[in-house]
Amino acid sequence: MRSHPATASIIDGALAARAILMVGTAHRCSCCGWRLRRFTQGGPLLRGKPNGYCPRCNSKPRHRFLWLWLAQHTPLFESHAGDPRFSVLHIAPARSTHRSFRKLGLSRYVTAGLDRKSRYDLRMDLGRPALRAGEFDLIVCVHVLEHVDDDLAAIAGLYELVAPGGTVVVGVPLRSDQPTAEDPSITDPAGREAAFGEPDHRRWYGLDIV
């Protein structure tokens, strides 16, 4: 089911109201730039949590780390706003990073995912990408592959879509104490949660993902 834009507006309004209550100088969110006195536990809660959610944009630590990494390691912020030669594909973006990308004013920023959400421009299976090969200079795919049945096909799709010399940023839940573990025979949510940490995850990635 596709989320309604009105719902997104309500959520944005609620976040803005919560953010006013959390204004401070102790921290600055790298995604939205909000200055706050503490991060929160998420949802509607105001209770603090170190390295928790931003009360303004609801970013998690991984979203803020992603934004800092992009600033330091890609040309995304180097006067590419409005440049039709620089294009970005964002797979299943979180609300916080989606807002941050939109604020950059990029002339070519495409969002895609399997769900019908208002912030997705198109519905697409990475294993069968419905876009031109080599079309994007930067592709961001964070916390997606662990949900995909055929992650090798999805990775091949990412390589197909990135332009020569471009960058694909992939982030996944990672365990450094074991190689990637998956078992396609585990299909029920309870079994997947026990084996892979979440009811909709298909695997635990190890350092061999490289």
Image (cartoon, rainbow, N blue to C red):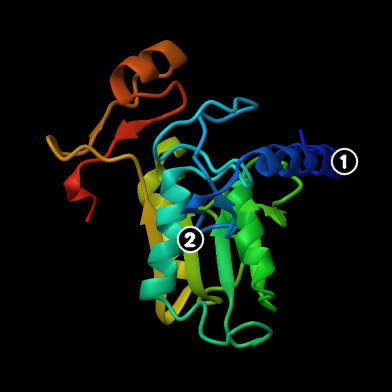
Tell which circle, 2 or 1, labels the residue nearer the N-terminal end.
1
Who is closer to the viewer here, 165 or 174?
174
Callouts 2 and 1 close, C-beta under 8 Å:
no
Q: What residue is pinned by disc 1?
A: 6
* Percent of width and height locating residue 6: 87, 41
Tag 2: residue type? Val
Q: How far apart in space, not on screen, are marks 2 and 1 (Cα)? A: 26 Å
Q: Is residue 93 above or below residue 105?
A: above
Quarter of the rendering occupied by the C terminus:
bottom left
- Residue 140: which disc? 2
* Percent of width and height locating residue 111: 64, 58
Q: Quadrant of residue 109?
A: bottom right
- Residue 80: which disc? none
Q: Is residue 78 above or below residue 28?
A: below
Q: Residue at coordinates 73% horizontally, 44% vertically from top-left?
A: 16
Quick one: SS at disc 2?
A: strand
Q: Residue at coordinates 36% horizontally, 45% vertically from top-left?
A: 172
Left-right relation of 2 to 200 = right
